[in-house]
Amino acid sequence: MSQIIHIDDMADPVVTPALAAWREGPADFPCPMTAGEVLARAMAETGLSDFGDDTGFRQRLAVILEALYEDEGLTRGGRVFVLKQAVRAMANRLRIEDLVRRHPEILEVPVERPIFIAGLPRSGTTHLVNWLSRDERLTSLTLWESEEPVAGPPVPPGEVDPRVTRSAEFWGAFGALVPHMAAMHEMAANDIHEDNELLFMDMNCYNWEFSARLPRWTRHYLAHDRAGSYAYEKKVLQAIAWQRGKPEGVRWLLKSPQHMENLAAIKAVFPDATMVITHRDPVDVLRSLTTMLGYSDRTRRSWIDPPALARLWADRIEALLRECVAQREAWGAEQSLDVLFHQYMADQQGMARRIYALAGLDLPPETEAKLLGYLAENPRHAHGKVHYDLEGVFGMDVAALRQRFAFYYERFPVKQEH
C-alpha cells in the first residue's frame, strides 16, 4: 500500500537554512528589474539583439513585472525566480530568431496533425502524455528541451547535453527543499513535459501564475487573443524538429492545462490537429492543486495564507472552465474527444485505443505493449499518496464550490469523487 503523506506545516513551515537561502535568492542577481533590463540581460547573455516581430510580448512582460511587484507576500528569491524565468524566455526567443534567420528553411518544416492533450491541472494529463509518448512514431518535448529549445555547440560523443545537466541540477535542488513534491508532480529533466513552456517565448504562458499571485496579469492574459502566441509556438516546434534532423516534420504529441482555455486559438493555428480533453471534478482538482502550490509556497513566500491561495485558484479554475465550455464547439467530433477522468482511470488501455482511432493511428501489438510497459513501471502513488484537506487547511466550502461549478458539471458529466 502507498504511504499516506500528511503535510502538517502548510501554513507555518519549518524554515531550514537551505530553505532560507532559497527564499533570499542569489545575491548577484538584480532585483527588482524593469522590462527593459530583462531584455538587456537576455541580450547580454546571448550576444544577440533581434527579438523578431513584436507580437505584444513586450507589453505582456511589462504587465507580468507590474503584477509581480504587487505580490507583497513573495520573498526576494521568489521574485528572482520569476525574473530569471523571464530572462531565460527572452534569451530563448533571441536564439530562436537567430536560428531561423540563419536557416530560413525551418519555416518550411511541416507541423502536421499534432495531437494536443488539454485538461485541468492534476487531471491526468501528465500521466497520459508520458505513456503515449512511448510510441516512437510520436514526438514529444522533454522538460530540459522545453526549457532551452535551441542547442548550443555540438556535444562530444558520450557526453551529456549541458541543457540536461542544468535542468536536472535545478529541479534536483528544488526537490530537496520540498521532497513531497515527487508524490504530487515530479519534475525530472528527461520526463515528457508541457509545451506551454514554449509560450513563455511570447510572454503568454500561464505558468507565471504558479510562481506568484498575479491577478493583474491573469486579467490581461484572458482579455487578449492568444492565437499569435500559438503561432510562435509553431515556429519553435519547427525549429526543434529541424534541429533533430527532421526537416520533413514529425507528428507532435503535446499537452498543457493551458490548452483547455485556448481551444479556438489552437484550432486557428493547427486546424488539422487532434484535440483530447481530460475532465475531472474541479473540486478534486482544487484539493490537489492547492496542496501542491501551498506546499511549494514555502520556497518563495515570506508568509503563507492557504485560504487566500484556494480562493485565488477557485477563481482561476472557474475562468479556465468557462473558457473551455465557451470554446468547446471549435472542435468537431471527428477531431476531438472528451475523456472523463474516472473512465480513464478505470480503463486506460481502452482510452488509448479510442485516442488512437480518433488520431488515425493504428495500434499494433508491439506498440501497445510499450504503452502498457510504461503503466507497469509507473503506478499511481509510487512516491506516496498525499492527504488533501481542502475544507480544513484551505477553508473552502465544498457545497458552495459545487454550485459555482454547476455550469461545468452540466456540460461534462464528471464524477464527483468526494
Image (cartoon, rainbow, N blue to C red):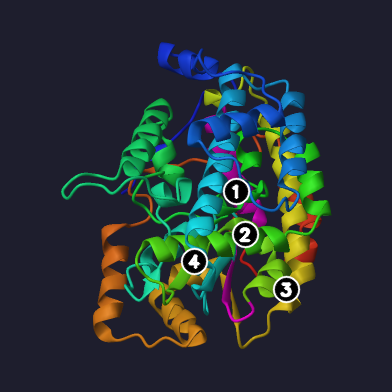
Q: Residue furthest front?
A: 102
Check disc 2 and report the residue beneath it. 232
The residue type indicated by label 2 comes to Tyr
Observer-side mark, 3 or 4, equals 4
Relative to 106, residue 256 above or below: above
Observer-side mark, 1 or 3, equals 1
Q: Which mark is residue 328?
A: 3
| CB under 8 Å between discs 3 and 4 | no
Binning the other alpha carbons within 10 Å of mark 1 as few (below 14), some (14 to 19) or many (20 upward) gives many
Check disc 4 and report the residue beneath it. 106
Decide which of tag 1 and tag 3 comes sooner along the chain. Answer: 1
Binning the other alpha carbons within 10 Å of mark 2 as few (below 14), some (14 to 19) or many (20 upward) gives some
* SS at circle 4: helix
State the residue in front, 215 or 164. Answer: 164
Q: Quadrant of the C terminus?
A: bottom right
The part of the chain drawn in magenta is 271-297
Relative to 43, residue 257 above or below: below
Residue at x-position 76% and y-position 70%? 327
* Label 4, label 2: how far apart the Cα atoms are: 13 Å
Observer-side mark, 4 or 1, equals 4
